[in-house]
Amino acid sequence: MDEDQHQEPRVNLDVQNRAFKYYIFDWDNNILHMPTRIHLEKRTAGDEWEPVAVSTSFYSVVRNDREHYRPPEGDWELAFREFRDFEEESESKFLLHTREALAPVIEGEVKQGPSFRQFRKALVEGRLFAIVTARGHRSETLRKGVEYFIEKVLSPEERSDMLANLRGYRAVFEDDEVEWTDEEVMTAYLNLNRYHAVTSPDFREKMGATEPGADMQEEAKQFAIMDFMRHVFRIVHESGVDKPISVGFSDDDPRNVRAVVEFIEHELHREFPQVKFVVYDTSEPDVPDGRKIVVAGQLEFEF
C-alpha cells in the first residue's frame, strides 16, 4: 500500500480547551416535526364521540381537556399506538416517521425543528446528550433514529470533524492510544449517550411506575434528566476532570418546560450546584431557536 493511501485519522486535541456543555433534547417538534399521530375520540356538538388523529403539538394543547377528548375505549395505549414498538412490525413507526420527516428537511422543502441546528452541532462537536421524549419506544429504537440522522444530515466534512473531536476526547481525557476504527469510535460515543422514551415499558420499570398514565410525562422527564445528570457526573469523575459544566434542555411543550424549570430550581441545582442550567422553550414557532431561560448560574450558553 502506498504511503499516501494510508492516512492517520485526525485527532483534535483542542477539545481539551472547550467548555463542558451537555444537552438534553426532546425529539418531536423540537428536533423534527414528525408525522406521528395520537388517536383520540372527540366529543361532537351532538354529544357523540368521533375518532380523530392529532399531532403531538395539538395534543400538548388539549391533553388535559378530558371533557372534549378521550382515548379510544378508555385505553391510552390505543391512543399512542404509533408511539410504541411492536414485535410484529418490520420497522418501528419512529424510524419510518424519522425518515419521512427528514427527507423534506434535507431537500429544503420544510423547516427544521427549532433545535435541529443545535442537535447537529452537538453531534459534530462530540458533545454528550440525552434524547428525552414522551414516546414509548425502546432505547435502541431512538438510538437508531440518531444514527439515521447522523448518516443523512451530517456532511462528509462534518462527520470527519465529529470523528476527530471524538478521538480528541478519548486521547485527552481517557489517555487512549488504541487505534480505533471510525465505526468503533462512533459506537463508543453513541453508547455514552442516553435515549429515554419515558412512556415505554422499560422506562416505566426503571422508574418504578406500574401504570402507563398520560399524566406522568413531566415527572418521567424529570427522572430521565436526573438519570442523565448522574451519568454525566460519573463520566466526569472517572476522567478526573475539574472544569465548569453547563447543561441545556430544550422542549416544545410549555408544561414540560415549566416542570423542568421547577425541577432544576428545587432539585437539580441543590444536587449539582456547580452546574449552569439553561432551558429552551421551543413552543413558539416565531422564535427560531426557542426562548432562552437561564435557570441557575450565569453563563453564555449558545443554543
Image: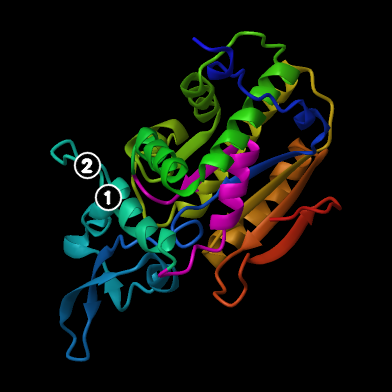
Which mark identifies residue 96? 1
Image-quadrant location for residue 4? top right
**Is residue 57 rendered to the left or right of residue 12?**
left
Q: In the orientation shown, which residue stands out farthest toward the front?
A: 2
Query: Is disc 1 surrounded by few (<14), some (14 to 19) or many (20+) residues within 10 Å?
Result: some
Quadrant that contains the C terminus: bottom right
**Residue 131: image location, x then y, percent:** 50, 44
Q: What element carries label 2?
A: loop
Q: Along the line of sight, which residue is nearer the eye, 136 or 167?
A: 167
**Residue 30: image location, x then y, percent:** 51, 59
Q: Along the line of sight, which residue is nearer the eye, 96 or 74?
A: 96
Residue 265 seen in the current view: no
Residue pointed to by mark 2: 91
From which residue to which does the magenta span run? 109-136
**Residue 123: image location, x then y, percent:** 58, 41
- At x 68%, y 24%, the residue is 11
Please, is residue 226 above or below residue 110 in the view? above
Q: Along the line of sight, which residue is nearer the eye, 298 or 14?
A: 14
